[in-house]
Image: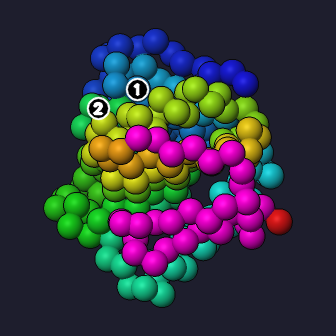
Amino acid sequence: MDTPVTFIMGDIMSEDEFFRFCQMNDTLSFERDSEGNIIFMSPAGSFSDNFNFEISLVFGSWLRENKIPGKAFGPSAGFTLPNRAVRSPDVAWVSREKWDALSRDEQERFAPLCPDFVIEVRSKSDSLIYLQNKMQEYLANGCRLAWLIDRYGKKVYVYEAERAIVEYSSLDIQLSGEPLFPGFVLNLAEIEK
């Protein structure tokens, strides 16, 4: 697995210019690191994207049924983290309080915040080390809970603020959303079928 193609740009593009660049090239996916370098993201394969979609369905349904205040997002939403990186996790959730503190213009762009919860699903073309570094970046920028699901290595990594990373060597597990989402459990074995 290779790392994504990165154009070393430095800080030559402002936030507005990068947003316009992404809008003008909307058939492509980009992220930007904290140094301003543009990272080209390849589309996920159908197998991986279906898995991601199933996770999103389960999570979204649970949020709706339990009337959890906040906003959930898919992989095409971008967030400008406090370190200035622009990231697009496969699944993200932002508390109502953080979301409502943004102006309408900020909500329409790459929201200037770090999601409270993220899920990254490793696709066949993803480098595990690259994704692990992204997870650490999310935590360093205020994320409270993050799951990295590596279907190819058959592992799951749970990242939680101020806690050691928990690693599971199986996809036949149930992930708990505690304490952020009391009562939420994601049964990976059911989704993996």
98 vs 60, left or right, is left
Q: Which residue is mark 1?
A: 33
Image quarter for residue 137?
top left
**Residue 108 x/y as whole percent:** 33, 56
- Which one is nearer the viewer's eye here, 55 or 156? 156
Q: Camera-side residue: 29 or 73?
A: 73
Using a 10 Å C-alpha cutoff, classify the residue at mark 1 as few (fewer than 14 neighbours), some (14 to 19) or many (20 or more).
Answer: many
Please state, as top left, top right, bottom left or bottom right, where the N terminus lies in the image. Answer: top right
Snapshot quadrant of residue 123: top right
Is 183 included in the stretch rendered in magenta?
yes
Span highlighted in magenta in the image: 164-192
Tag 2 residue = 84
**Classed neighbour count for the residue bearing mark 2: other residues with Cα under 10 Å, few (<14), some (14–19), many (≥20):** some
Quick one: label 2 or label 1, which is nearer the N terminus? Answer: 1
Q: Please determine whether, in this image, residue 180 is positioned above or below residue 144.
A: below
Q: Is residue 47 left or right of residue 60?
A: right
